[in-house]
Image (spheres, rainbow, N blue to C red):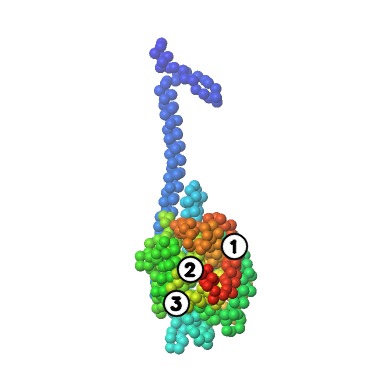
Amino acid sequence: MTGKRNDHREVRLLKNGCPFRLKGMRTTHHFRSFCSWRCLLVFALMILIGCETQLDRDQKEVDRWMTQARRFVQQKHLFEWFLLTRGQNYSRADFYKEFRQLFSLPRVRFVDRVMQQTGSQLRVRELQYFKTFLLREMFALSRAASQDQLYTYLLNTPLALKGKTVRLIDLPYAVATLEQARERRRLYRKGLNRLAPLDTTLIGRQKALLAFVQRTGFDSLQAWYSFVSGFGSSQVFQLARQVLAATDSLYRTLLEAALAEKQPLSMPEFWYLRAHLPDLPAWAPAQGLEALQSQAGLFGESLPVGTRFTLDLSDSAGKIPLSRCLPVTVPEDVRITHRPWHSGRDWVRLSELFGEGEHFSNTLVKQWTFRQAGRGTALKALAYLWELMWEDSTWLAEHFSTGPDTLTRLVYGPDYRRSLVLYRLLELRLAAAEVLLQSPAVLTAGDPLRAAQSVLRQALNLHLEGSEQSVLIFFEQEYSQAADRFLGQILAYQIRRRLEERFGAPWYRQAPAIRYVKTVWRRGLDWPLPSFLHSLQLRTPDLQPLLDSLSRMLEDNHRSISGEEDHEAAIH
């Protein structure tokens, strides 16, 4: 009997919280029941692991697309390099055809879905940049064929002047480098006649953008702009209008003083004036590179020309006169192309380009999107910070290798400082205009080309006739690039003021300020504007530091250059 009870012992179980008895249950049955529960738990865990594995597989698929995108960007920059340096055009339509699947709405939606399931904020930011990149290139894909037609026309339409032939794409550069006003006007008129057929191209571009925004599900044009730039477009448009209002009187006053002809300014004279500001000596390559090396030396860096940097400053006939810093592979292969105007503008423009180049060549983050597909505002702001050294009399006196008479004129002379202020106002107002040219008020106007002309007239005090609207082709930029260029100029003055408030002046002699700049460089393009502002303990882009700096430069024009005391203060 005892053995039988051991074989059929009673097992107490809980049912709805109450004990009850099941007679005749063997202990082996209890064990099997326990194993069954364990199997169920293991099965449930496998399901959970399966979900995670699916997300992992999706992440790997996105990484594979990022590898394709990296190859795309590298090839695109190489195509652009040979276009700019040699005038070798390429078929954008054929190039994009290879990546058509990558730049598609299904891929964008897939990335967005993966992003929604991702817990890591770093990875979320990486995916957000990638999504933005895909959409921007989707728009470029939609325009590829029309861009091919445009560049073919601009590169293959000749203009003759005094036995020389220039291409239509060179019109602004060719006009700006002619010394005789009559020749400038003659060449401009010839070019304008050839540009007239492009009116339909401009209108087509605007319609294509509006259609793309609607097709991709954005509520409005401004919503698209805010998405691709990472900052509210309404704030940018408001700041652009504020810039034009706040600087209008000073700009017109300095413009009138600088020009022999009456205002408003004709387009050929605008191009000529812009190419010859500020009032620095004509560009000399050896001297120029020495000045740029001295800027890099302040950061404990050297310009790695021939290793990480490829530099083309030639003046060959085939070269397109568009200055660019092309990050082919970051940080190993950064290329700069610039066709010199042989004027003072070369110095400041190259400082900006080399500022960008140092940023890319000192980027240390591993993620590709942070290197080449992130936000460009911090990049432009620090590049303009390099350019601001040309406003610094201390840096000029110590690092600009030129004759003593020229140096005295630059450090103490009123003409140079006035030209610097006019240069900054012209560039800033042009950047504001290029932002406003993208605004809904212009693109959705009854006659968008006339509306665009009105913006340029107000911003630059230009005289534009109805027949000149096709010249707008030289002012069109993609919104996020225009916004970065505009905000970068304003932020550069804020950065300089903040660094000198925190660490002392001049900022480039203060080790903590240098460390801050290098920290920004290391993160590459992983700088959403709010995050970048927060790193400086700033809330929003503010025009006041720029206005204060320009006013101070004009006040400095009243200094006496004969006093030894003033001389010592400026040099030391």
Disc 3 is placed on an element classified as: loop
- Quarter of the view holding residue 67: bottom left
Q: Which residue is mark 2?
A: 395
> Could you tell me how far apart the alpha carbons at marks 1 and 3 are, in whole angstroms?
38 Å
Task: Check the image and name the residue furthest to the left.
Answer: 307
Q: On residue 542, which mark appears?
A: 1
Task: Check the image and name the residue furthest to the front.
Answer: 564
Say what amino acid the circle numbered 3 marks. Gly
Say what amino acid the circle numbered 2 marks. Trp
Q: Look at the image and tell me whether residue 291 can be seen.
A: yes
Q: On residue 403, which mark appears?
A: 3
Disc 1 is placed on an element classified as: loop
**Nearer mark to the viewer, of 1 and 2:** 2
> Could you tell me how far apart the alpha carbons at marks 1 and 2 are, in whole angstroms?
25 Å
Q: Residues within 10 Å of mark 1 (few under 14, many from 20)?
A: some
Say what amino acid the circle numbered 1 marks. Asp
Image-based side of 418 in relation to 87, left or right? right
Q: Nearer the viewer, residue 11 or 121?
A: 121
**Nearer mark to the viewer, of 1 and 3:** 3
Q: Position of residue 508 (x, y in %)?
A: 48, 62
State whether residue 386 is above or below residue 515: below
State whether residue 22 is above or below residue 507: above
Image-based side of 4 in relation to 431, left or right? left
